[in-house]
Image: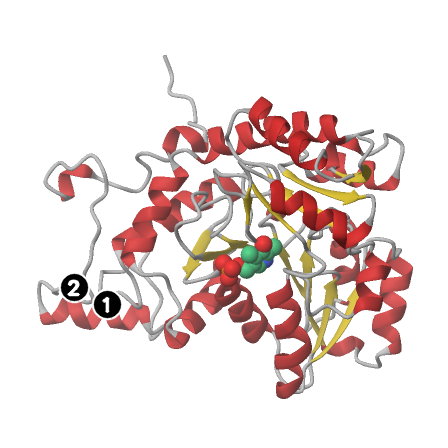
Amino acid sequence: MSKPSFKPESLMMSHGYDPHLSEGAVKCPIFQTSTFAFKSAEDGKAFFEVAYGLRDKEPDEELGLIYSRINNPDLEILEDRLCLWDHAEVCAVFESGMSAISTVLLEFLKPGDLLLHSKPVYGGTSHFIDKILPQFGIQSIGFHSDHEMSDIIQKVEDSGKRDRLKLIYVETPANPTNALIDLEICRSVSDYFKTKSNSPVIAVDNTYMGPLWCQPLTLGADLVIYSATKYIGGHSDLIAGAVLGNKELMTRIKVLRTFLGNMTGPWTGWLLMRSLETLKPRMELQASNAAKVADFLRNHPKVEKVFYLGHLKSGSKMHAIFKKQYSSPGAMISIDIKGGEKNAFIFLNHLQLFHLAVSLGSTESLAEHPFSMTHADVPIIEKNALGLTDKMVRLSIGVENADDLIWDISQSLNKIC
Ligand SMILES: *Cc1c(COP(=O)(O)O)cnc(C)c1O
């Protein structure tokens, strides 16, 4: 019988690791070392030539292990495994999602350049774009899910900087409203402004839906970015990030990572490999629990509106984007609770199984109040324009028993009179 090409979930326990190089250990050990011994001075010289780009790698040459800021087996094997989910050539892991995002922004934007980005984006990303990039003379333009392609092109033209558009940065679905951005439109915008000497790079923050339910690289994106703190880590016990893409762009990212020194350590790399073994069953259970919770919340007398991708109306623009880009509605639900902040807080304060905490994508279910917590520093007019009001509660659904989650939500909503 011929061997099939194994699916990523089948390879998460073995890919890229040879037990016989590590005393037969079935699990990859933690290579808790800062530096690696060279077999000879000639080897050391050859490894540095490749690592510092003084010459290209020979076709069958592997970069030798040098120093854990440059490479380490726990990081390299983890990166090879992450590539399988996203159909990527190269991956780089970072010490946080923010360090992955800021490294991408700094590598592709130079003084005088223009950034085009979707809105809303994660609070930390938004701070970096609005407060830090301007210090380097980098201007940005935002667009949201209601904008048509022609609106976006007009905004870029109006800036007078069409030839300096270097990066299109997208977060979809938007946090916490689940609004969707059409990646095909982003690709067309990049192609529209492409010249002989400039091809705007499209980077997608896929934290909410990846790597299981969306593969942006197959939908026209050049780079995919993660907060691996969320679904990839999945146990609320680590902070990490990742960027994936083709060899050419990722070489640039990896060189900047080497000199910023913001790679993860071996211990976090090892924890992430542990997490990847259960990624698919975790995410599938979270999504099936979320579907049950969302259906319960729909038409609940204390709930004004449910923001859940599984409830999009077929025939709507959002539903068409959803069908094109995602294989599941995911496990993030936001709800508007009738009565504003007061009742939202009563609900949050009476939950017994859900934790009242920010973050998402983990085994345990979490609830928070975006208006006053994750999105506290977004200007109020902007929040209102996005439908992010003080009645909203965001739920990240975990792997608990769905009936228990529904019981908890129900008893807590009943505390509102
Ligand atoms: C959490 C998060 C980030 C930031 O990641 P950290 O690991 O906390 O640095 C970026 N983008 C999204 C969508 C997130 O949810």
Task: Report how many numbered discs are placed on residues in the image.
Answer: 2
- Residue 223 visible, this orientation: no
Q: Identity of the amino acid at label 1?
A: Tyr
Residue 214 to residue 313: above or below = below
Local SS, label 2: loop
Residue 356 to residue 305: above or below = below
Q: Identity of the amino acid at label 2?
A: Phe
Q: Where residue 36 sits: x, y (%)?
A: 16, 64
The CB of the residue at mark 1 lies under 8 Å from ligand 1: no
Q: Where residue 22 sits: x, y (%)?
A: 14, 43
Taking the view exactly as shown, the residue that stands out farthest to the top is 1
- Distance between mark 2 and mark 1 Cα atoms: 6 Å
Residue positioned 81% across, 66% down in the render: 382
Residue 60 to residue 372: above or below = above
Most foreground residue, 98 or 243: 98
Marks 2 and 1 close (CB-CB < 8 Å) = yes
Query: Which residue is labeled 2 in the image?
Result: 36
Please rate how many residues cluster around mark 1, counting C-alpha atoms within 10 Å: few if below 14, some from 14 to 19, many from 20.
few
Residue 192 to residue 324: above or below = below
Residue 416 in the figure: left or right of residue 71? right
- Residue 103 visible, this orientation: yes
Query: Which residue is labeled 1 in the image?
Result: 67
Figure quarter occupied by ligand 1: bottom right
The CB of the residue at mark 2 lies under 8 Å from ligand 1: no
Local SS, label 1: loop
Q: How is the model colour-coded?
A: secondary structure
Residue positioned 20% across, 54% down in the render: 31
Please rate how many residues cluster around mark 2, counting C-alpha atoms within 10 Å: few if below 14, some from 14 to 19, many from 20.
some
Residue 151 in the figure: left or right of residue 379? right
Most foreground residue, 76 or 63: 76
Q: Earlier in the sequence, mark 2 or mark 1?
A: 2
